[in-house]
Amino acid sequence: MTATDPIHFVGIDVAYFIASLLLALGLRYMSSPTRARSSIWYAGAGMVIAIGATLLIDGDSGRRVLIPIAMFIGASFAYVQSRKVSMTGAPALIALYNGLGGAAAAGIALVELLRAAEHTSSLRVLAIVGALAGTVSFAGSTMAWIKLRSNMRRSVPFPNRQVVYLASMVLLFLVGLVLAYSNTSHPVLLMFFVLLALFFGISMTLPIAAADLPVLISLYNAMTGLAVGFEGFVLGNPAMMVAGTLVFASGALLTRLMAKAVNRRLSEIMYSGFGVSGDELSTTSKAGFVNEIEAHDAAASMAFARRVIIVPGYGMAIAQAQHKLRELTQLLDERGVQTAFAIHPVAGRMPGHMNVLLADAGVPYEKIADLSAINEEFSQADVALVVGANDTVNPSARTDVNSPIYGMPVMNVDQAGSVILLKRGDGRGYADVPNPLLEAPGTRVLMGDAMMSLQALITSIKAID
């Protein structure tokens, strides 16, 4: 059977159709933490089928050898790196890999634009948009990776950044028009377009402070999907069209939901930045006197409570204490205490960070509730246990109009009968904003690493008759 055999192409189309179904199924299963692991296998199988079908189309025997070799090298490197990375490093790694996906899509677009005469003007327009989205995603995701890896809490503003954004966008639009409606390739102009897109992606990310990073990473994920989808149209590859469109649609929806969760318009996040500027940070004060509590007293408060709501945060991820937290809630459940987990949409450093950790620890999905579903129930809880969370439980977001995070919905933990905070720092959190919750009369602070503190709580509860 030859590459020009109609049966051959029918088989390719069937393979692409099966691959698309598996990709859609994988994305569907991603919506549930209990099925997320199987979703990876479905999506992976779909990609293997799509790649195999693509290799069968290409009649060049050299590329059929080189492409699998390149894939093997990349997969081996990614496998080793993913096995070594800790859960605290996962958000940065995800941002980096998302950026690499955008770079790959942008690279395809640039190759096609160098062969401008082979494409219609409409396809060149799609290639330009794909190149822009992929390059901005690569630059922005890489910048996000740097900020996460270096624990860069502060935004990095620069003078007249709105003017810079507008000028960059106008230039990109004009250069894109020239490239899209020219029948000949312009390598120098194309390189200028790429550099300008890289600058735009970096400049868009620098002013973004910690509170908006998960939203921005989700946005870049959607942009990578857009780039892949458009390049699928340029190449006439159905698998790329479907995969890119699915990623773009889901990423765009997730971005909108996360922006809504922090009560911010996406235009505000991208255009004006969010969080604390350098001058504001220099004037903030550290937390004052806090009421500390011993582990055995905290354990007794929870052991004899009617209901305990747990709010996990990035501190739990740093300590890798999710399994200890699960053990603690099992002990409380055995004593007849009602337990539930309250998850803020932007807790952690990536979308769904806390959900992934709790699912990894085997926490039943029905015990996990998001902010909108459980926030009104804190007033009915005897104890709110905050494990390494700070910005998402900061009441100044509701009460202090001068706070940099004012207007961001936060967990109403201060409305619980009592609050027990597991902290190891000064209570400023990743956004570097002081948290008055630590000084509230109903709050008790158990200082130390979350893993050690939870183990002390477990031991104390076991000792209670």
Image: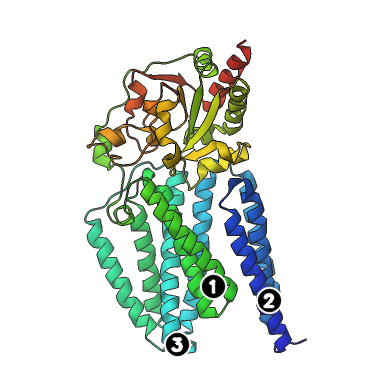
**In this figure, which residue is indicated by the disc labeled 2?**
14
Identify the residue at image location x=52%, y=67%: 244
Q: Nearer the viewer, mark 1 or mark 3?
A: 1
Calculate the distance from the C-alpha at mark 3 to the C-alpha at mark 2: 27 Å
Is 316 displayed left or right of 57 in the figure?
left
Q: Position of residue 351 (x, y in %)?
A: 48, 48
356 versus 221 height, above or below: above
Amino acid type of the residue that numbered disc 1 sits on in the rendered structure:
Met
Q: Dot 2, how many residues are within 10 Å of its Cα: few (below 14), some (14-19), or many (20+)?
A: few
**In this figure, which residue is indicated by the disc labeled 1?**
241
Give the mark nearer the N terminus: 1 vs 2.
2
Q: Nearer the viewer, mark 1 or mark 2?
A: 2
Calculate the distance from the C-alpha at mark 1 to the C-alpha at mark 3: 18 Å
**In this figure, which residue is indicated by the disc labeled 3?**
120
Give the mark nearer the N terminus: 3 vs 2.
2
Element under disc 1: helix
Give the mark nearer the N terminus: 1 vs 3.
3
Q: Dot 3, how many residues are within 10 Å of its Cα: few (below 14), some (14-19), or many (20+)?
A: some
Amino acid type of the residue that numbered disc 2 sits on in the rendered structure:
Val
Element under disc 3: loop
Choose between 225 and 258: the one closer to the eye. 258
Element under disc 2: helix
Cβ atoms at labels 3 and 2 below 8 Å apart = no
